């Protein structure tokens, strides 16, 4: 099967070919014809399956099929949960639409709003935005969504996890009633199905991977180690195996900073990325990591869905996530688009239950590899991971002193991005969520 056989125009096929793609992925092969026909779609796909091109290509063609005379308006709106994902999607729109006269724009918080207002005065056919900043523009009446023909909700499950449901509903209220709706989600929870029921009109359902299935091309390993020796073990694994382009996940922002500092002292080039970093710092770290100038990127879960690097070879869970589904999203950064990858987890005695919950979710036992010299001390007892902290780590992201357990984010200082807590799970709120949102206390991402 070719992209041309799906009904795409010569200009789009040419752009895809120039990107080095010759055959559509399963989600693309199924989604593109449905979207081209104008119907609503509910799509389920793992990260790395080509989902973005699956809706971007037919969206571009649909807009080109109905050229608008006179003043140009925003005709397509793509909502994403994080800034990184917004940038990734908007880049795809530009790359695939390079031979078309359509103009796109990305809009997110953490940066000055005035250049965005100025850009909105020009032509914008396709807007890719995070909900919080989009609502800022709506309140200031600097954006007009009354001509939107196609709405895309990307990573809808993550948007709900981050407490964006109210923001999404406020955006929906100002959109034209007659429009095409596309919803994409890695998982189909009851909450997602409820949202879809109120949003989609007789949608086609496409699901190309079992719910919470981890990619078969990812080799998963667990390394047992005492909590105090994780840094030494990670350093040894990176050096002994000559790992490059290693994405390491920590549970906390403080822990990410400390680990990056330690790796740099060990002559392993590393940077941390999380919600307290400025947008410029995050962009620079991602750029250096993508070009392999940076050996290790240490991240909280802000990066779990916002990094799009082809053939990323190594993902390391320095600390297991508190929510099992986040493990799937984290390791989904590797083993993408037919490439092999490795996912390694450093697991101390405190995390045995988290590991059990992950294995139950993915319906498989993960191979255990014991590194000589790092055998866990049987005398060490487990400590509860309460609010994301024990002796082995700092506070969980978004759970600073004096903050509500599952509510709003930190106070905004200096115009920087807000960060927040997460969705309650098992009595403890989730950490490491992307910074572009606050949570269910009614706050908004900026």
Image (cartoon, helix red, strand yellow):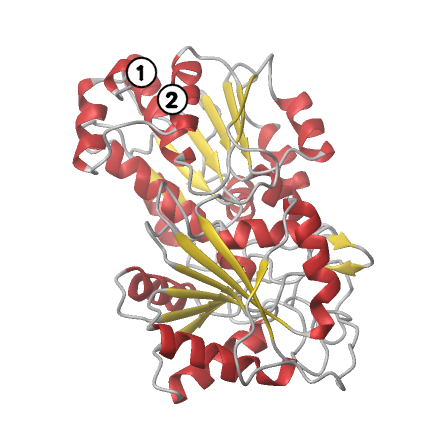
Looking at this rendering, what residue extends furthest in the bottom direction? 265
Q: Above or below — where is 80 with respect to 355?
A: above
Left/right of residue 35 with respect to residue 183 in the rendered view = left
Q: Quadrant of the N terminus?
A: top left
Marks 2/1: CA–CA distance: 7 Å
Residue 106 occupies which quadrant of the picture?
Answer: top left
Given residues 390 and 273, the one toward you in this image is 390
Read off the residue under disc 2.
29
What residue sits 35% from the left and 65% below the top? 245
Query: Circle 1: is it few (<14), some (14-19), or many (20+) Cα within 10 Å?
Result: some
Q: Are marks 2 and 1 in contact (CB under 8 Å)?
A: yes
Given residues 138 and 164, the one toward you in this image is 164
What residue sits 52% from the left and 17% below the top? 40
Q: Above or below — where is 1 with respect to 233?
A: above
Q: Earlier in the sequence, mark 2 or mark 1?
A: 1
Which mark is on residue 6? 1
Left/right of residue 394 with respect to residue 313 in the rendered view = right
Q: Quadrant of the C terminus?
A: bottom right
């Amino acid at each position: 099967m070719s992209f041309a056989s799906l009904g795409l125009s010569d200009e789009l096929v040419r752009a895809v070919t120039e990107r080095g793609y010759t055959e559509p992925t399963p989600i693309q092969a199924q989604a593109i014809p449905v979207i081209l026909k104008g119907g609503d779609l509910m799509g389920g796909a793992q990260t790395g399956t080509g989902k973005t091109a699956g809706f971007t290509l037919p969206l571009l063609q649909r807009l080109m099929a109905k050229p608008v005379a006179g003043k140009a308006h925003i005709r397509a709106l793509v909502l994403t949960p994080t800034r990184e994902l917004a940038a990734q999607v908007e880049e795809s729109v530009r790359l695939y639409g390079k031979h078309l006269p359509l103009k796109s724009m990305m809009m997110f918080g953490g940066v000055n709003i005035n250049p965005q207002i100025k850009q909105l005065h020009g032509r914008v056919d396709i807007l890719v935005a995070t909900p919080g900043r989009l609502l800022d523009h709506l309140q200031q009446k600097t954006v007009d969504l009354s001509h939107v023909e196609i709405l895309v909700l990307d990573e809808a499950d993550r948007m709900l996890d981050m407490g964006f449901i109210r923001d999404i509903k406020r955006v929906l209220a100002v959109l034209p009633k007659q429009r095409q709706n596309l919803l994409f989600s890695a998982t189909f929870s009851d909450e997602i199905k409820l949202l879809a029921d109120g949003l989609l009109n007789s949608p086609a359902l496409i699901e190309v991977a079992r719910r919470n299935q981890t990619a078969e091309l990812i080799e998963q390993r667990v390394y047992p180690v005492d909590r105090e020796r994780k840094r030494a073990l990670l350093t040894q694994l990176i050096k002994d195996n000559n790992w490059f382009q290693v994405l390491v996940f920590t549970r906390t922002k403080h822990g990410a900073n400390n680990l990056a500092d330690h790796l740099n002292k060990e002559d392993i080039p590393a940077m941390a990325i999380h919600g307290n970093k400025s947008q410029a710092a995050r962009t620079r770290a991602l750029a250096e990591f993508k070009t392999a100038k940076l050996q290790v990127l240490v991240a909280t879960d802000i990066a779990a869905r916002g990094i799009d690097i082809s053939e990323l070879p190594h993902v390391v869970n320095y600390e297991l996530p508190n929510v099992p589904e986040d493990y799937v999203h984290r390791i989904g950064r590797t083993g993408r688009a037919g490439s092999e990858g490795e996912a390694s987890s450093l697991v101390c005695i405190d995390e045995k239950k988290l590991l059990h919950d992950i294995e139950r979710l993915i319906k498989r036992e993960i191979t255990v590899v014991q590194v000589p010299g790092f055998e866990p001390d049987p005398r060490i007892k487990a400590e509860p991971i309460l609010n994301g902290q024990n002796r082995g780590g700092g506070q969980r992201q978004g759970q600073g002193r004096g903050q509500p357990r599952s509510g709003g984010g930190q106070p905004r200082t200096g115009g920087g991005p807000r960060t927040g807590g997460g969705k309650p799970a098992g009595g403890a709120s989730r950490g490491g969520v992307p910074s572009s949102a606050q949570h269910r206390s009614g706050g908004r991402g900026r």
